[in-house]
Image (tube, rainbow, N blue to C red):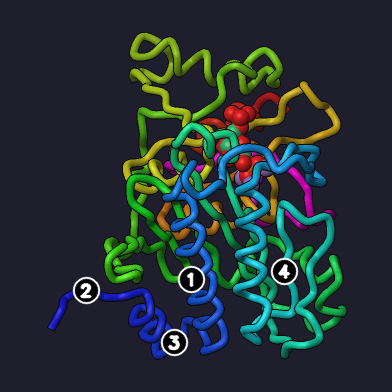
């Protein structure tokens, strides 16, 4: 008998352990199936006609790529008829998408960044999909925006898929963070790492340094200290990596540690950060905390933030626990 544990088997065992119910199991299976479809499209590259601009924009003020739109449609289409969801929300849609009346409605809400790392699509660099699952709150119409405005600590599942040299799915249902790799011949995700652990300390940081002049003073001071290296207050040398796909940068951190930072910057003082709380920061924070890491907005825990808007943005500091504490301290001391 094969020693491989498929995603299907893993989820059935999670259900038997009472970590998820059957509806959530099937919902995760549907999301994984949609990611496989997106992975196939990504793999075709220029031959699949998926590169380039869609010629439209989203509520974030970004020009949409063809693949942003395609991935969004794949996720909606795959999830509409399953019967597990009340509604979906996406980086690429202004408002929540209620499950059409033609299908039964379930008790979960699905939020996603259908295609993360859009600037890397046309240059053949790793991109991905990020998702977050919430339960319908009892007291509001489950299809309204208000139903989605729950803190990250209320998530019942979160994950991301990286479309890279291999397609990998990283998942948490609140009992550890686990990695699955797509077996392209079999067409199924296979468990390749149970309980990923992020080392508490690191000598690697990920940030877009070109924004340095726009950062707050404590942010600049922190990076200056890292750059001094061994002779400076941190007493060690640091290496830098920046892929510009959050999925790929976070995946490196889950694999070998590091700190990922997208701070507030004054390029657009009205925006509290670039990354989105509901589609990016919350699901990634859940995965990172479940792997022993930490995640803050520079001052406090991301998953404690009460959301006020569906497309809310937030500064993000996540990864190796001690390093996230160090950079958070720089900010707290400056306040
Ligand atoms: P998206 O492609 O979903 O809009 O997200 C892009 C994000 C994130 O993936 C990445 O970390 C960051 O934007 C990169 O930003 P810069 O281009 O400013 O480096
Ligand atoms: Mn975008
Ligand atoms: Mn994104
Ligand atoms: Mn996106």
Q: Calculate the distance from the C-alpha at mark 2 to the C-alpha at mark 3.
A: 19 Å
Q: Report the front residue among 216 and 148.
A: 148
Q: Residues within 10 Å of mark 1 (few under 14, many from 20)?
A: some
Task: Name which quarter of the figure residue 136 lies in.
Answer: bottom right
Q: Calculate the distance from the C-alpha at mark 1 to the C-alpha at mark 4.
A: 16 Å
Q: Secondary structure at mark 1?
A: helix
Q: Residues within 10 Å of mark 2 (few under 14, many from 20)?
A: few
Q: Is mark 1 within 8 Å of ligand 4?
A: no
Q: Report the front residue among 147 and 328.
A: 147
Residue 33's label in the rendered image is 1
Magenta-colored stretch includes residue 310: yes
Magenta-drawn segment: 300-321
* Marks 4,3: beta carbons within 8 A: no
Q: Residues within 10 Å of mark 3 (few under 14, many from 20)?
A: some
* Marks 2,3: beta carbons within 8 A: no
If you read the primary sequence from the N terminus, does the residue marked by circle 4 or circle 3 appear first? 3
Residue 15's label in the rendered image is 3
What residue sits right under mark 4 in the picture?
88
Look at discs 4 and 3 and give the one toward the viewer.
4
What residue sits right under mark 2 in the picture?
4
Q: Secondary structure at mark 4?
A: strand
Look at discs 2 and 3 and give the one toward the viewer.
2
If you read the primary sequence from the N terminus, does the residue marked by circle 2 or circle 4 appear first? 2
């Amino acid at each position: 008998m094969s020693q491989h544990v498929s995603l299907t088997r893993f989820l059935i065992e999670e259900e038997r352990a009472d970590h998820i119910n059957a509806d959530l199991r099937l919902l995760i299976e549907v999301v994984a199936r949609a990611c496989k479809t997106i992975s196939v499209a990504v793999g075709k590259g220029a031959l699949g006609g998926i590169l380039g601009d869609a010629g439209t924009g989203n509520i974030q003020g970004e020009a949409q790529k063809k693949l942003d739109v395609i991935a969004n449609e794949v996720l909606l289409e795959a999830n509409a008829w399953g019967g597990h969801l009340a509604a979906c929300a996406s980086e690429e849609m202004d408002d929540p998408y209620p499950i059409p009346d033609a299908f039964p409605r379930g008790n979960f809400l699905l939020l996603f960044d259908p295609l993360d790392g859009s600037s890397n699509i046309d240059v053949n660099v790793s991109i991905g999909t990020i998702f977050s699952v919430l339960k319908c709150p009892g007291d509001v119409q489950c299809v309204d925006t208000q139903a989605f405005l729950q803190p990250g600590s209320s998530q019942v599942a979160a994950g991301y898929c990286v479309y890279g040299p291999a397609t990998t799915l990283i998942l948490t249902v609140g009992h550890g963070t686990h990695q699955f790799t797509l077996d392209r011949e079999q067409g199924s995700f296979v468990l390749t790492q149970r309980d990923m652990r992020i080392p508490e300390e690191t000598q690697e940081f990920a940030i877009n340094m070109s924004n340095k002049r726009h950062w707050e003073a404590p942010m600049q001071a922190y990076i200056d200290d890292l750059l001094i290296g061994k002779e400076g207050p941190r007493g060690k040398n640091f290496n830098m990596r920046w892929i510009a796909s959050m999925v790929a940068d976070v995946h490196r951190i889950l694999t070998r540690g590091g700190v990922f930072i997208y701070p507030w910057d004054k390029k657009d003082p009205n925006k509290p950060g670039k990354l989105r709380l509901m589609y990016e920061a919350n699901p990634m924070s859940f995965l990172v905390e479940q792997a022993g890491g930490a995640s803050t907005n520079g001052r406090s825990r991301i998953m404690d933030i009460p959301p006020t808007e569906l497309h809310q943005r937030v500064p993000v500091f996540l990864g190796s626990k001690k390093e996230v504490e160090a950079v958070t301290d720089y900010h707290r001391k400056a306040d």
